[in-house]
Image: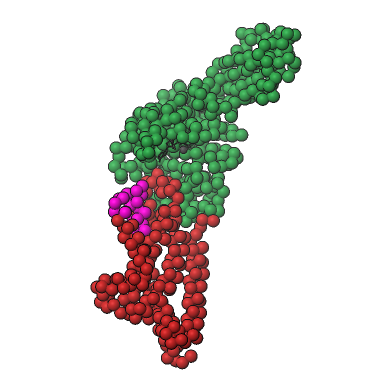
Chain colours: A green, B red
Amino acid sequence: MIRKSAAVPAAFDETPEAAPAEAHIVFEGIGKTYAGGVRALNGVSFEIRRGGVFGIIGRSGAGKSTLLRAINMLERPTEGRVRVDGVDVAALSEAELMRLRRRIGMIFQHFNLLAAKTVRENVGLPLEVAGVPAAEVRRRVDALLDLVGLSDKAEVYPAKLSGGQKQRVGIARALVHDPEILLCDEATSALDPETTASILDLLRDINAKLGLTVVLITHDMAVIRAICDEVLVLDGGDIVEQGPVWKVFGDPKGDATRALLSPLRHGLPADLAARLRPEPPPHGGHAVLALRFTGESHPEGVSLAALLALAPDAKLLHGGVDRIQGHAQGDLIVSVPVAAMRSAVGARFSPDSLKVLGYVAHDV
Amino acid sequence: MSPTMFDRYLRAFSETLTMVSISVAISIFVGLVLAVTLVATAPGGLYPRPRFNKAVSVVVNVFRAIPFIILLVALLPFTRLIVGTTLGTWAAIVPLSIHLIAFYTRIAQVSLNEVDHGLIEAAHAMGFRRWHIVRHVMLPEALPGIVGGMTVCVIAMINSSAMAGAVGAGGLGDLAIRYGYERYETEVLFQIIVILVALVTTVQFGGEWLSRRVDHRR
Ligand SMILES: Nc1ncnc2c1ncn2[C@@H]1O[C@H](COP(=O)(O)OP(=O)(O)OP(=O)(O)O)[C@@H](O)[C@H]1O
Ligand SMILES: [Mg+2]
Protein backbone atom coordinates (compact mmCIF):
# COMPACT_ATOMS: atom_id res chain seq x y z
CA MET A 1 0.00 0.00 0.00
CA ILE A 2 1.36 3.37 -0.94
CA ARG A 3 1.32 5.84 1.89
CA LYS A 4 2.24 9.41 2.16
CA SER A 5 5.82 9.81 3.32
CA ALA A 6 6.51 11.51 6.61
CA ALA A 7 8.06 14.43 4.78
CA VAL A 8 4.76 15.87 3.61
CA PRO A 9 5.09 19.64 3.39
CA ALA A 10 3.28 21.67 5.98
CA ALA A 11 1.21 23.23 3.22
CA PHE A 12 -1.21 20.33 3.55
CA ASP A 13 -2.33 21.48 6.96
CA GLU A 14 -3.51 24.80 5.65
CA THR A 15 -6.69 24.90 3.68
CA PRO A 16 -5.58 24.64 0.04
CA GLU A 17 -8.12 27.23 -1.04
CA ALA A 18 -6.66 29.85 1.30
CA ALA A 19 -3.42 30.51 -0.56
CA PRO A 20 -4.02 32.30 -3.86
CA ALA A 21 -2.14 29.97 -6.20
CA GLU A 22 -0.25 31.40 -9.12
CA ALA A 23 -0.95 29.63 -12.39
CA HIS A 24 2.15 28.09 -13.95
CA ILE A 25 0.63 26.24 -16.90
CA VAL A 26 -2.64 27.37 -18.43
CA PHE A 27 -4.66 25.34 -20.94
CA GLU A 28 -7.08 27.38 -23.01
CA GLY A 29 -9.53 25.31 -25.01
CA ILE A 30 -7.02 22.64 -26.01
CA GLY A 31 -8.37 20.37 -28.73
CA LYS A 32 -6.57 17.69 -30.68
CA THR A 33 -7.65 15.73 -33.72
CA TYR A 34 -5.02 13.25 -34.87
CA ALA A 35 -4.19 12.87 -38.54
CA GLY A 36 -6.32 9.74 -38.81
CA GLY A 37 -9.35 11.71 -37.59
CA VAL A 38 -9.21 10.47 -33.99
CA ARG A 39 -10.53 13.14 -31.65
CA ALA A 40 -8.29 12.94 -28.56
CA LEU A 41 -9.21 16.20 -26.77
CA ASN A 42 -12.36 18.30 -26.97
CA GLY A 43 -11.26 21.79 -26.05
CA VAL A 44 -10.21 21.53 -22.41
CA SER A 45 -9.37 24.51 -20.22
CA PHE A 46 -7.75 24.45 -16.80
CA GLU A 47 -4.77 25.71 -14.85
CA ILE A 48 -1.88 24.06 -13.05
CA ARG A 49 -0.57 26.07 -10.16
CA ARG A 50 3.10 26.66 -9.52
CA GLY A 51 4.97 24.36 -7.16
CA GLY A 52 2.24 21.78 -6.76
CA VAL A 53 1.92 18.15 -7.74
CA PHE A 54 -0.85 17.90 -10.29
CA GLY A 55 -2.31 14.54 -11.25
CA ILE A 56 -4.16 13.61 -14.42
CA ILE A 57 -6.22 10.42 -14.37
CA GLY A 58 -8.54 8.79 -16.81
CA ARG A 59 -9.17 5.56 -18.61
CA SER A 60 -6.91 4.32 -21.38
CA GLY A 61 -7.39 6.51 -24.43
CA ALA A 62 -8.89 9.39 -22.46
CA GLY A 63 -6.32 11.80 -23.90
CA LYS A 64 -4.00 12.13 -20.91
CA SER A 65 -0.73 11.74 -22.80
CA THR A 66 -1.93 14.03 -25.56
CA LEU A 67 -2.69 16.68 -22.95
CA LEU A 68 0.63 16.29 -21.14
CA ARG A 69 2.60 16.35 -24.37
CA ALA A 70 0.98 19.61 -25.37
CA ILE A 71 2.94 21.29 -22.56
CA ASN A 72 6.31 20.75 -24.27
CA MET A 73 4.85 20.53 -27.78
CA LEU A 74 5.81 16.90 -28.33
CA GLU A 75 2.28 16.81 -29.67
CA ARG A 76 0.85 19.98 -31.15
CA PRO A 77 -2.77 20.67 -30.26
CA THR A 78 -5.01 21.42 -33.22
CA GLU A 79 -7.02 23.99 -31.25
CA GLY A 80 -6.43 26.28 -28.32
CA ARG A 81 -3.36 27.48 -26.51
CA VAL A 82 -1.03 26.27 -23.79
CA ARG A 83 0.70 28.98 -21.83
CA VAL A 84 3.73 28.28 -19.69
CA ASP A 85 4.54 31.30 -17.54
CA GLY A 86 2.17 33.23 -19.72
CA VAL A 87 3.98 32.34 -22.95
CA ASP A 88 2.06 30.64 -25.75
CA VAL A 89 4.26 27.61 -26.41
CA ALA A 90 2.89 26.96 -29.90
CA ALA A 91 4.11 30.37 -31.06
CA LEU A 92 7.76 29.72 -30.17
CA SER A 93 10.44 29.38 -32.83
CA GLU A 94 12.42 26.15 -32.98
CA ALA A 95 15.28 27.65 -30.96
CA GLU A 96 12.91 29.09 -28.37
CA LEU A 97 11.04 25.81 -28.11
CA MET A 98 14.34 24.05 -27.48
CA ARG A 99 15.09 26.47 -24.67
CA LEU A 100 11.61 25.93 -23.22
CA ARG A 101 12.05 22.18 -23.34
CA ARG A 102 15.22 22.47 -21.32
CA ARG A 103 13.12 24.11 -18.60
CA ILE A 104 10.70 21.19 -18.66
CA GLY A 105 11.96 17.79 -17.52
CA MET A 106 10.12 14.66 -18.56
CA ILE A 107 10.14 11.06 -17.39
CA PHE A 108 8.54 8.09 -19.11
CA GLN A 109 6.90 4.78 -18.36
CA HIS A 110 9.64 2.85 -20.14
CA PHE A 111 12.41 5.17 -18.93
CA ASN A 112 13.79 5.80 -22.44
CA LEU A 113 17.42 5.62 -21.39
CA LEU A 114 20.13 5.24 -24.03
CA ALA A 115 21.37 1.64 -23.92
CA ALA A 116 24.68 2.61 -25.52
CA LYS A 117 25.60 5.08 -22.79
CA THR A 118 26.46 4.69 -19.13
CA VAL A 119 24.34 6.20 -16.38
CA ARG A 120 26.74 9.13 -16.17
CA GLU A 121 26.62 9.70 -19.93
CA ASN A 122 22.84 9.41 -20.01
CA VAL A 123 22.39 12.03 -17.32
CA GLY A 124 25.10 14.32 -18.70
CA LEU A 125 24.15 14.19 -22.38
CA PRO A 126 21.47 16.93 -22.31
CA LEU A 127 24.08 19.29 -20.82
CA GLU A 128 26.76 18.17 -23.23
CA VAL A 129 24.62 18.88 -26.30
CA ALA A 130 23.73 22.24 -24.78
CA GLY A 131 27.43 23.09 -24.79
CA VAL A 132 28.07 22.99 -21.05
CA PRO A 133 31.79 22.51 -20.23
CA ALA A 134 32.80 18.96 -19.26
CA ALA A 135 33.85 19.82 -15.71
CA GLU A 136 30.53 21.49 -15.04
CA VAL A 137 28.68 18.50 -16.54
CA ARG A 138 30.59 16.19 -14.22
CA ARG A 139 29.79 18.26 -11.18
CA ARG A 140 26.06 18.45 -12.03
CA VAL A 141 25.80 14.74 -12.81
CA ASP A 142 27.51 13.79 -9.55
CA ALA A 143 25.16 16.02 -7.58
CA LEU A 144 22.08 14.59 -9.31
CA LEU A 145 23.16 10.97 -8.96
CA ASP A 146 23.65 11.70 -5.31
CA LEU A 147 20.15 13.20 -5.09
CA VAL A 148 18.56 10.10 -6.61
CA GLY A 149 20.80 7.73 -4.64
CA LEU A 150 22.72 6.21 -7.52
CA SER A 151 26.25 7.55 -7.01
CA ASP A 152 27.67 4.02 -7.07
CA LYS A 153 26.10 3.23 -10.45
CA ALA A 154 27.58 6.11 -12.45
CA GLU A 155 29.69 3.95 -14.77
CA VAL A 156 27.11 1.19 -15.25
CA TYR A 157 25.03 0.68 -18.40
CA PRO A 158 21.21 0.91 -17.99
CA ALA A 159 20.70 -2.75 -18.94
CA LYS A 160 22.33 -3.68 -15.64
CA LEU A 161 19.86 -1.65 -13.55
CA SER A 162 16.50 -2.58 -12.02
CA GLY A 163 13.36 -0.77 -13.14
CA GLY A 164 13.38 1.48 -10.10
CA GLN A 165 17.02 2.38 -10.62
CA LYS A 166 16.37 3.11 -14.30
CA GLN A 167 13.59 5.49 -13.35
CA ARG A 168 15.92 7.20 -10.88
CA VAL A 169 18.36 7.74 -13.74
CA GLY A 170 15.41 9.06 -15.77
CA ILE A 171 14.61 11.50 -12.98
CA ALA A 172 18.23 12.62 -12.64
CA ARG A 173 18.37 13.19 -16.40
CA ALA A 174 15.09 15.13 -16.35
CA LEU A 175 16.47 17.42 -13.64
CA VAL A 176 19.79 18.10 -15.30
CA HIS A 177 18.80 21.49 -16.73
CA ASP A 178 17.32 22.65 -13.42
CA PRO A 179 13.79 22.61 -14.82
CA GLU A 180 10.79 24.41 -13.40
CA ILE A 181 8.37 21.73 -14.50
CA LEU A 182 8.59 17.95 -14.36
CA LEU A 183 6.25 15.91 -16.57
CA CYS A 184 5.70 12.26 -15.68
CA ASP A 185 3.82 10.03 -18.12
CA GLU A 186 2.99 6.89 -16.14
CA ALA A 187 6.41 7.02 -14.56
CA THR A 188 5.61 4.25 -12.08
CA SER A 189 3.36 2.03 -14.20
CA ALA A 190 6.16 -0.43 -14.97
CA LEU A 191 7.28 -0.72 -11.34
CA ASP A 192 6.28 -2.93 -8.43
CA PRO A 193 4.39 -1.34 -5.49
CA GLU A 194 7.41 -0.99 -3.24
CA THR A 195 9.57 0.58 -5.96
CA THR A 196 6.64 2.80 -6.91
CA ALA A 197 6.46 4.05 -3.33
CA SER A 198 10.17 4.89 -3.32
CA ILE A 199 9.95 6.72 -6.64
CA LEU A 200 6.94 8.68 -5.39
CA ASP A 201 8.83 9.61 -2.23
CA LEU A 202 11.66 10.83 -4.43
CA LEU A 203 9.28 12.90 -6.58
CA ARG A 204 7.67 14.37 -3.47
CA ASP A 205 11.08 15.15 -2.10
CA ILE A 206 12.19 16.85 -5.31
CA ASN A 207 8.97 18.82 -5.45
CA ALA A 208 9.54 20.06 -1.90
CA LYS A 209 13.31 20.68 -2.21
CA LEU A 210 13.46 22.21 -5.66
CA GLY A 211 9.98 23.71 -5.70
CA LEU A 212 9.25 22.59 -9.22
CA THR A 213 5.79 21.98 -10.58
CA VAL A 214 5.11 18.29 -11.11
CA VAL A 215 2.46 17.13 -13.59
CA LEU A 216 1.87 13.41 -13.59
CA ILE A 217 -0.31 10.93 -15.40
CA THR A 218 -1.25 7.66 -13.81
CA HIS A 219 -3.81 4.88 -13.91
CA ASP A 220 -3.15 4.20 -10.27
CA MET A 221 -5.41 6.09 -7.89
CA ALA A 222 -3.07 5.21 -5.04
CA VAL A 223 -0.36 7.28 -6.76
CA ILE A 224 -2.64 10.29 -6.88
CA ARG A 225 -3.60 9.80 -3.24
CA ALA A 226 0.04 9.43 -2.25
CA ILE A 227 1.55 12.56 -3.75
CA CYS A 228 -0.84 14.83 -5.62
CA ASP A 229 -2.29 18.09 -4.39
CA GLU A 230 -4.75 18.45 -7.21
CA VAL A 231 -6.27 16.01 -9.63
CA LEU A 232 -7.96 16.31 -13.00
CA VAL A 233 -10.18 13.54 -14.32
CA LEU A 234 -10.29 13.16 -18.08
CA ASP A 235 -12.70 10.99 -20.02
CA GLY A 236 -13.14 10.77 -23.77
CA GLY A 237 -11.22 14.00 -24.28
CA ASP A 238 -13.31 15.99 -21.79
CA ILE A 239 -12.69 17.12 -18.25
CA VAL A 240 -14.96 15.22 -15.86
CA GLU A 241 -13.88 17.06 -12.76
CA GLN A 242 -10.95 18.75 -11.13
CA GLY A 243 -10.01 19.81 -7.63
CA PRO A 244 -8.01 19.05 -4.49
CA VAL A 245 -7.43 15.31 -4.23
CA TRP A 246 -9.38 14.90 -0.98
CA LYS A 247 -12.41 16.58 -2.50
CA VAL A 248 -12.47 14.58 -5.70
CA PHE A 249 -11.73 11.33 -3.88
CA GLY A 250 -14.13 12.05 -1.04
CA ASP A 251 -17.05 13.03 -3.19
CA PRO A 252 -16.54 12.09 -6.82
CA LYS A 253 -19.09 13.70 -9.11
CA GLY A 254 -18.57 11.90 -12.38
CA ASP A 255 -19.26 8.29 -13.28
CA ALA A 256 -15.80 7.99 -14.81
CA THR A 257 -14.25 9.18 -11.53
CA ARG A 258 -16.31 6.74 -9.49
CA ALA A 259 -15.32 3.90 -11.78
CA LEU A 260 -11.66 4.82 -11.50
CA LEU A 261 -11.90 5.13 -7.72
CA SER A 262 -13.78 1.91 -7.12
CA PRO A 263 -10.64 -0.17 -6.44
CA LEU A 264 -9.85 2.12 -3.50
CA ARG A 265 -13.39 2.10 -2.08
CA HIS A 266 -14.68 -0.36 0.48
CA GLY A 267 -17.67 -1.73 -1.36
CA LEU A 268 -20.16 -4.27 -0.15
CA PRO A 269 -18.47 -7.70 0.09
CA ALA A 270 -20.04 -10.34 -2.15
CA ASP A 271 -21.03 -12.76 0.62
CA LEU A 272 -22.94 -10.02 2.38
CA ALA A 273 -24.57 -8.81 -0.79
CA ALA A 274 -25.90 -12.33 -1.41
CA ARG A 275 -27.70 -12.37 1.94
CA LEU A 276 -29.31 -8.94 1.68
CA ARG A 277 -33.05 -8.65 1.25
CA PRO A 278 -34.98 -5.47 0.46
CA GLU A 279 -37.49 -5.65 3.37
CA PRO A 280 -36.87 -6.16 7.08
CA PRO A 281 -37.68 -9.74 8.19
CA PRO A 282 -40.88 -10.10 10.29
CA HIS A 283 -39.12 -10.64 13.62
CA GLY A 284 -36.48 -8.03 13.95
CA GLY A 285 -33.29 -8.79 12.05
CA HIS A 286 -30.55 -6.32 11.21
CA ALA A 287 -30.27 -3.44 8.86
CA VAL A 288 -27.03 -3.09 6.87
CA LEU A 289 -25.99 0.54 6.49
CA ALA A 290 -23.36 2.15 4.33
CA LEU A 291 -21.85 5.24 5.90
CA ARG A 292 -19.81 7.52 3.73
CA PHE A 293 -17.45 10.16 5.05
CA THR A 294 -16.28 12.56 2.41
CA GLY A 295 -13.85 14.46 4.62
CA GLU A 296 -16.00 17.59 4.29
CA SER A 297 -17.97 17.64 7.56
CA HIS A 298 -15.68 15.56 9.79
CA PRO A 299 -12.22 16.22 8.43
CA GLU A 300 -10.67 15.38 11.78
CA GLY A 301 -11.96 11.81 11.73
CA VAL A 302 -14.87 9.53 12.58
CA SER A 303 -15.86 9.58 16.24
CA LEU A 304 -15.81 6.10 17.75
CA ALA A 305 -18.21 7.19 20.50
CA ALA A 306 -20.65 8.28 17.84
CA LEU A 307 -20.31 4.95 16.12
CA LEU A 308 -21.08 3.22 19.39
CA ALA A 309 -24.07 5.50 19.89
CA LEU A 310 -25.60 4.06 16.73
CA ALA A 311 -26.83 1.21 18.84
CA PRO A 312 -25.23 -0.90 21.53
CA ASP A 313 -25.41 -3.91 19.23
CA ALA A 314 -24.10 -2.16 16.14
CA LYS A 315 -21.31 -3.96 14.35
CA LEU A 316 -18.63 -2.67 12.05
CA LEU A 317 -18.65 -5.18 9.18
CA HIS A 318 -16.32 -3.75 6.61
CA GLY A 319 -14.68 -0.48 5.72
CA GLY A 320 -11.82 1.88 6.14
CA VAL A 321 -10.86 5.50 6.61
CA ASP A 322 -8.04 7.24 4.75
CA ARG A 323 -6.51 10.55 5.61
CA ILE A 324 -5.97 12.56 2.45
CA GLN A 325 -4.51 16.05 2.75
CA GLY A 326 -5.69 16.15 6.35
CA HIS A 327 -9.23 15.04 5.57
CA ALA A 328 -10.42 11.72 6.98
CA GLN A 329 -12.66 9.98 4.51
CA GLY A 330 -13.91 6.53 3.72
CA ASP A 331 -16.72 4.01 3.78
CA LEU A 332 -18.01 2.01 6.73
CA ILE A 333 -20.52 -0.80 6.44
CA VAL A 334 -22.29 -1.51 9.72
CA SER A 335 -25.16 -3.66 10.86
CA VAL A 336 -27.71 -2.37 13.38
CA PRO A 337 -30.67 -4.25 14.92
CA VAL A 338 -33.78 -3.00 13.14
CA ALA A 339 -35.42 -2.16 16.48
CA ALA A 340 -32.65 0.25 17.36
CA MET A 341 -32.35 1.78 13.95
CA ARG A 342 -34.45 4.90 14.30
CA SER A 343 -32.56 6.21 17.28
CA ALA A 344 -29.38 5.26 15.57
CA VAL A 345 -29.52 7.99 13.02
CA GLY A 346 -29.33 10.64 15.67
CA ALA A 347 -28.25 14.21 15.52
CA ARG A 348 -24.89 13.61 17.13
CA PHE A 349 -23.78 11.30 14.43
CA SER A 350 -24.00 12.39 10.86
CA PRO A 351 -21.99 10.78 8.14
CA ASP A 352 -21.97 12.68 4.87
CA SER A 353 -24.25 10.04 3.52
CA LEU A 354 -26.07 7.12 5.03
CA LYS A 355 -27.72 4.49 2.95
CA VAL A 356 -29.69 1.47 4.01
CA LEU A 357 -28.31 -1.26 1.78
CA GLY A 358 -30.84 -3.88 2.92
CA TYR A 359 -31.64 -6.26 5.71
CA VAL A 360 -30.43 -9.59 6.97
CA ALA A 361 -32.44 -12.08 9.01
CA HIS A 362 -29.79 -13.00 11.50
CA ASP A 363 -26.79 -11.43 12.96
CA VAL A 364 -23.99 -11.24 10.40
CA MET B 1 55.08 -24.67 -53.65
CA SER B 2 57.40 -22.86 -56.04
CA PRO B 3 58.50 -19.32 -55.18
CA THR B 4 56.64 -17.92 -58.19
CA MET B 5 53.46 -19.66 -57.14
CA PHE B 6 53.88 -18.34 -53.61
CA ASP B 7 54.28 -14.85 -55.04
CA ARG B 8 51.06 -15.31 -56.98
CA TYR B 9 49.22 -16.25 -53.80
CA LEU B 10 50.67 -13.29 -51.98
CA ARG B 11 49.73 -10.93 -54.77
CA ALA B 12 46.24 -12.36 -55.10
CA PHE B 13 45.76 -12.12 -51.36
CA SER B 14 46.86 -8.49 -51.21
CA GLU B 15 44.68 -7.65 -54.24
CA THR B 16 41.66 -9.19 -52.55
CA LEU B 17 42.50 -7.33 -49.35
CA THR B 18 42.87 -4.03 -51.24
CA MET B 19 39.61 -4.44 -53.13
CA VAL B 20 37.69 -5.53 -50.07
CA SER B 21 39.05 -2.99 -47.64
CA ILE B 22 38.79 0.03 -49.90
CA SER B 23 35.36 -0.76 -51.27
CA VAL B 24 34.08 -1.65 -47.77
CA ALA B 25 35.45 1.60 -46.37
CA ILE B 26 33.84 3.64 -49.15
CA SER B 27 30.56 1.74 -48.96
CA ILE B 28 30.21 1.94 -45.22
CA PHE B 29 30.79 5.64 -45.21
CA VAL B 30 28.49 6.43 -48.14
CA GLY B 31 25.98 3.76 -47.09
CA LEU B 32 25.72 5.22 -43.59
CA VAL B 33 25.23 8.71 -44.96
CA LEU B 34 22.51 7.42 -47.29
CA ALA B 35 20.86 5.37 -44.54
CA VAL B 36 20.76 8.36 -42.18
CA THR B 37 19.39 10.47 -45.04
CA LEU B 38 16.69 7.91 -45.79
CA VAL B 39 15.67 7.55 -42.14
CA ALA B 40 15.75 11.27 -41.44
CA THR B 41 13.80 12.32 -44.55
CA ALA B 42 11.16 9.61 -44.22
CA PRO B 43 7.62 10.77 -43.38
CA GLY B 44 7.56 11.33 -39.62
CA GLY B 45 11.36 11.50 -39.51
CA LEU B 46 13.54 14.33 -38.24
CA TYR B 47 13.57 16.23 -41.55
CA PRO B 48 10.57 14.82 -43.44
CA ARG B 49 11.02 15.17 -47.24
CA PRO B 50 8.76 12.40 -48.58
CA ARG B 51 9.45 12.92 -52.28
CA PHE B 52 13.20 13.23 -51.97
CA ASN B 53 13.09 10.17 -49.74
CA LYS B 54 11.20 8.19 -52.32
CA ALA B 55 13.63 9.18 -55.06
CA VAL B 56 16.72 8.11 -53.07
CA SER B 57 14.98 4.90 -52.12
CA VAL B 58 14.22 4.04 -55.74
CA VAL B 59 17.83 4.68 -56.80
CA VAL B 60 19.11 2.43 -54.01
CA ASN B 61 16.66 -0.27 -55.06
CA VAL B 62 17.81 -0.11 -58.66
CA PHE B 63 21.40 -0.82 -57.64
CA ARG B 64 20.26 -3.49 -55.19
CA ALA B 65 18.43 -5.27 -57.99
CA ILE B 66 21.29 -5.50 -60.50
CA PRO B 67 23.50 -8.61 -60.13
CA PHE B 68 27.10 -7.64 -59.51
CA ILE B 69 28.56 -9.12 -62.70
CA ILE B 70 26.08 -7.15 -64.80
CA LEU B 71 26.66 -3.99 -62.80
CA LEU B 72 30.38 -4.45 -63.41
CA VAL B 73 29.88 -4.38 -67.16
CA ALA B 74 27.18 -1.72 -67.19
CA LEU B 75 29.36 0.62 -65.15
CA LEU B 76 32.43 0.37 -67.42
CA PRO B 77 32.04 3.88 -68.91
CA PHE B 78 31.51 5.35 -65.47
CA THR B 79 34.50 3.43 -64.13
CA ARG B 80 36.68 4.82 -66.89
CA LEU B 81 35.49 8.31 -66.01
CA ILE B 82 36.39 7.88 -62.35
CA VAL B 83 39.68 5.95 -62.39
CA GLY B 84 40.72 6.48 -66.01
CA THR B 85 40.83 2.77 -66.88
CA THR B 86 38.53 -0.24 -67.05
CA LEU B 87 41.19 -2.74 -66.04
CA GLY B 88 42.85 -3.65 -62.77
CA THR B 89 42.14 -3.57 -59.08
CA TRP B 90 41.05 0.06 -58.98
CA ALA B 91 38.67 -0.48 -61.86
CA ALA B 92 37.02 -3.24 -59.82
CA ILE B 93 36.72 -1.08 -56.74
CA VAL B 94 34.25 1.27 -58.44
CA PRO B 95 31.51 -1.29 -59.22
CA LEU B 96 32.23 -3.20 -56.01
CA SER B 97 31.69 -0.06 -53.95
CA ILE B 98 28.52 0.93 -55.77
CA HIS B 99 27.13 -2.58 -55.42
CA LEU B 100 27.96 -2.63 -51.74
CA ILE B 101 26.73 0.91 -51.00
CA ALA B 102 23.22 -0.10 -52.02
CA PHE B 103 23.46 -3.27 -49.94
CA TYR B 104 24.86 -1.60 -46.84
CA THR B 105 22.45 1.34 -47.02
CA ARG B 106 19.55 -1.06 -46.49
CA ILE B 107 21.28 -2.89 -43.66
CA ALA B 108 22.13 0.33 -41.84
CA GLN B 109 18.66 1.70 -42.51
CA VAL B 110 17.06 -1.28 -40.79
CA SER B 111 19.31 -0.83 -37.74
CA LEU B 112 18.53 2.89 -37.57
CA ASN B 113 14.80 2.28 -37.91
CA GLU B 114 14.93 -0.19 -35.05
CA VAL B 115 16.02 2.52 -32.62
CA ASP B 116 13.16 2.87 -30.13
CA HIS B 117 11.03 5.87 -31.02
CA GLY B 118 10.72 6.64 -27.31
CA LEU B 119 14.42 7.51 -27.22
CA ILE B 120 14.04 10.03 -30.01
CA GLU B 121 11.02 11.49 -28.32
CA ALA B 122 12.89 11.74 -25.02
CA ALA B 123 15.69 13.56 -26.83
CA HIS B 124 13.17 16.03 -28.29
CA ALA B 125 11.72 16.53 -24.82
CA MET B 126 15.19 17.30 -23.48
CA GLY B 127 15.74 20.01 -26.06
CA PHE B 128 18.17 18.23 -28.39
CA ARG B 129 18.87 19.69 -31.81
CA ARG B 130 17.91 17.35 -34.62
CA TRP B 131 21.51 16.81 -35.58
CA HIS B 132 22.28 15.88 -31.95
CA ILE B 133 19.56 13.27 -32.09
CA VAL B 134 21.27 11.66 -35.10
CA ARG B 135 24.73 11.96 -33.58
CA HIS B 136 24.04 11.04 -29.95
CA VAL B 137 20.90 8.91 -30.07
CA MET B 138 20.30 7.22 -33.41
CA LEU B 139 23.86 6.33 -34.44
CA PRO B 140 25.12 5.08 -31.04
CA GLU B 141 21.93 3.12 -30.38
CA ALA B 142 22.07 1.50 -33.83
CA LEU B 143 25.80 0.78 -33.54
CA PRO B 144 25.53 -2.95 -32.75
CA GLY B 145 23.46 -3.45 -35.92
CA ILE B 146 25.69 -1.15 -37.93
CA VAL B 147 28.77 -3.12 -36.89
CA GLY B 148 27.00 -6.45 -37.49
CA GLY B 149 26.12 -5.19 -40.97
CA MET B 150 29.75 -4.38 -41.67
CA THR B 151 30.70 -8.01 -41.02
CA VAL B 152 28.07 -9.16 -43.49
CA CYS B 153 29.41 -6.62 -45.99
CA VAL B 154 33.05 -7.62 -45.71
CA ILE B 155 32.08 -11.24 -46.32
CA ALA B 156 29.82 -10.34 -49.23
CA MET B 157 32.71 -8.33 -50.65
CA ILE B 158 35.16 -11.23 -50.37
CA ASN B 159 32.66 -13.19 -52.46
CA SER B 160 31.92 -10.50 -55.02
CA SER B 161 35.59 -9.65 -55.48
CA ALA B 162 36.10 -13.15 -56.89
CA MET B 163 34.17 -11.97 -59.93
CA ALA B 164 36.36 -8.89 -60.33
CA GLY B 165 38.84 -11.05 -62.18
CA ALA B 166 36.63 -10.33 -65.17
CA VAL B 167 38.19 -6.86 -65.37
CA GLY B 168 41.66 -8.12 -64.62
CA ALA B 169 41.56 -7.04 -61.02
CA GLY B 170 43.20 -10.22 -59.78
CA GLY B 171 42.54 -11.47 -56.29
CA LEU B 172 42.11 -14.89 -54.79
CA GLY B 173 38.94 -15.70 -56.67
CA ASP B 174 40.60 -14.88 -59.97
CA LEU B 175 43.54 -17.12 -59.11
CA ALA B 176 41.19 -19.96 -58.28
CA ILE B 177 39.36 -19.62 -61.55
CA ARG B 178 42.44 -19.33 -63.73
CA TYR B 179 44.43 -22.19 -62.19
CA GLY B 180 41.82 -24.31 -60.49
CA TYR B 181 39.05 -24.12 -63.05
CA GLU B 182 40.67 -23.37 -66.39
CA ARG B 183 43.84 -25.46 -65.88
CA TYR B 184 42.32 -28.16 -63.68
CA GLU B 185 44.86 -27.57 -60.91
CA THR B 186 42.53 -28.76 -58.18
CA GLU B 187 45.25 -28.34 -55.57
CA VAL B 188 45.28 -24.57 -56.16
CA LEU B 189 41.52 -24.49 -56.04
CA PHE B 190 41.53 -26.39 -52.77
CA GLN B 191 44.20 -24.18 -51.19
CA ILE B 192 42.32 -21.04 -52.15
CA ILE B 193 39.14 -22.41 -50.69
CA VAL B 194 40.99 -23.02 -47.42
CA ILE B 195 42.37 -19.47 -47.46
CA LEU B 196 38.93 -18.00 -48.19
CA VAL B 197 37.28 -20.06 -45.46
CA ALA B 198 39.94 -18.95 -42.99
CA LEU B 199 39.49 -15.33 -44.07
CA VAL B 200 35.71 -15.42 -43.82
CA THR B 201 35.81 -17.19 -40.46
CA THR B 202 38.27 -14.64 -39.07
CA VAL B 203 36.11 -11.77 -40.30
CA GLN B 204 32.97 -13.39 -38.90
CA PHE B 205 34.47 -13.99 -35.44
CA GLY B 206 36.15 -10.62 -35.40
CA GLY B 207 32.90 -8.94 -36.37
CA GLU B 208 30.93 -10.81 -33.72
CA TRP B 209 33.48 -9.91 -31.10
CA LEU B 210 33.31 -6.23 -32.10
CA SER B 211 29.50 -6.31 -32.14
CA ARG B 212 29.48 -7.66 -28.62
CA ARG B 213 31.96 -5.02 -27.53
CA VAL B 214 29.69 -2.18 -28.67
CA ASP B 215 26.42 -3.79 -27.55
CA HIS B 216 25.35 -2.73 -24.06
CA ARG B 217 21.74 -3.73 -24.42
CA ARG B 218 21.98 -6.71 -22.08
N1 LIG C 1 -0.12 9.53 -32.86
C1 LIG C 1 -1.45 9.25 -32.83
N2 LIG C 1 -2.13 9.12 -33.99
C2 LIG C 1 -3.45 8.86 -33.99
N3 LIG C 1 -4.19 8.71 -32.88
C3 LIG C 1 -3.57 8.82 -31.70
C4 LIG C 1 -2.16 9.09 -31.60
N4 LIG C 1 -1.82 9.15 -30.31
C5 LIG C 1 -2.95 8.92 -29.61
N5 LIG C 1 -4.01 8.73 -30.43
C6 LIG C 1 -5.40 8.49 -30.03
O1 LIG C 1 -5.83 9.58 -29.24
C7 LIG C 1 -6.58 9.14 -28.13
C8 LIG C 1 -5.94 9.64 -26.86
O2 LIG C 1 -4.67 9.06 -26.75
P1 LIG C 1 -3.73 9.32 -25.50
O3 LIG C 1 -2.46 8.60 -25.78
O4 LIG C 1 -3.66 10.76 -25.21
O5 LIG C 1 -4.53 8.57 -24.35
P2 LIG C 1 -4.09 8.25 -22.86
O6 LIG C 1 -5.14 8.79 -21.98
O7 LIG C 1 -2.71 8.69 -22.62
O8 LIG C 1 -4.16 6.66 -22.87
P3 LIG C 1 -3.26 5.61 -22.08
O9 LIG C 1 -3.73 5.64 -20.68
O10 LIG C 1 -3.58 4.31 -22.74
O11 LIG C 1 -1.84 6.01 -22.25
C9 LIG C 1 -6.66 7.62 -28.26
O12 LIG C 1 -7.88 7.29 -28.85
C10 LIG C 1 -5.52 7.27 -29.14
O13 LIG C 1 -5.82 6.12 -29.89
MG1 LIG D 1 -0.85 7.68 -22.26
- The answer to whether residue B69 is above or below residue B123 is below
Residue A127 covered by magenta stretch: no
| Image: magenta residue range | B33-54
Residue A103 against residue B213 in the figure, above or below? above
Name the residue located 38 percent from the left edge and 41 percent from the top edge.
A74
Specify the quadrant of the image occupied by residue A268: top right
Q: Residue at x 49, y 46 (%)?
A: A111
- Residue A323 horizontal side relative to residue B168, left or right: right
Query: Left or right of A68: which side holds A97?
Result: left
Q: Nearer the viewer, residue B35 or B61?
A: B61
Q: Quick check: A270 above or below A171?
A: above
Residue B84: percent from left, percent from top: 25, 77
Quarter containing the C terminus of chain A: top right
**Along the line of sight, which residue is nearer the eye, A231 or B54?**
B54
At 75% from the left and 16% from the top, the residue drawn is A362
Among the 4 quarters of the image, the one containing residue B154 = bottom left
Is residue A239 positioned above or below A171 on the image?
A: above
Q: Position of residue A237 (x, y in %)?
A: 42, 30
